[in-house]
Image (cartoon, rainbow, N blue to C red):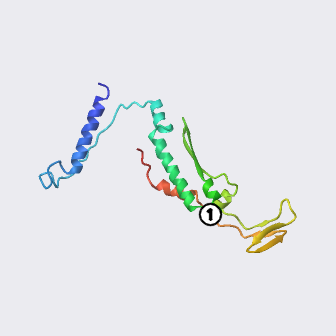
Amino acid sequence: MYGLPDSFIGNTARKLIRRSLSGGGGPPGGPGRGRKRSIIVWKVIHVKIYKPQLNLILNTPRGNLWGALHRRGESIVRGAKRQVGVRTGALRTSIHMKHTGNFTGQYLWIGSNRNYAYAHHEGTRPHLITPNKKPVLVFRAGTRLIRTTEVFHPGTRPNPYLTTPMRKSLIRPIKVR
């Protein structure tokens, strides 16, 4: 008989809520129409929490929270790929997510392994570019081939392609299925 009081209370509360939301359960236009909705309040006492079961629900891939957090991370990755600047598409394709968890919690790592990803995200100050291995820099400007010993780069504006989708996803509540 363990669990009978819980199931009795839960089923009764569900029936009362369903009845109050439907307006009384009578035929349309009948005596149930126009009734005030009931508010049900109950207090739960003497709850036993089993830590292994709680850990299973919260911190393993079989738990509901894992799936909800994973969907949130995928949403952030999609938003980052939409917002990132595209010249060759290499940065966009390198954005990925790693979802790990242990007894201390769950962790999402979202980012890119490209060496210029941080500069794209945070922007750069104006700076001087000089050759490292060869005596001159060689690059094309339109159809002209330019050779020079130094170039002044004007800097780049930041594009927070990771933090913007993350902030947007924090506004929405997590739906646990």
Image coordinates for residue 18, horizontal then vertical, percent:
24, 46
Judge by depth and name the residue closer to the eye, 139 or 117: 139
Query: Does residue 140 lie above or below 61 as drawn?
Result: below
Q: Is residue 47 left or right of residue 56?
A: left
Residue at 72% over, 70% down: 154
**Where does label 1 land, which residue?**
86
Q: Quadrant of residue 143 in the image?
A: bottom right
Residue at 31% over, 38% down: 43
Q: Say which quadrant the N terminus sits in.
A: top left
Count neighbours of disc 1 (C-alpha within 10 A) and say few if under 14, some if 14 to 19, many if 20 or more. few
Judge by depth and name the residue closer to the eye, 42 or 127: 127
- Residue type at mark 1 is Val
Q: How many circles with numbers are drawn on the protein?
A: 1
From where the camera sits, is residue 62 visible? yes
Identify the residue at the far left of this view.
Answer: 31
Q: Say which quadrant the C terminus sits in.
A: top left
Image coordinates for residue 36, horizontal then vertical, percent:
20, 52
Residue at 87% over, 64% down: 135
From where the camera sits, is residue 109 visible? no
> What secondary structure is marked by label 1?
loop
Query: Does residue 49 lie above or below 32 as drawn?
Result: above
Image coordinates for residue 141, horizontal then vertical, percent:
75, 73
Image coordinates for residue 91, horizontal then vertical, percent:
64, 57
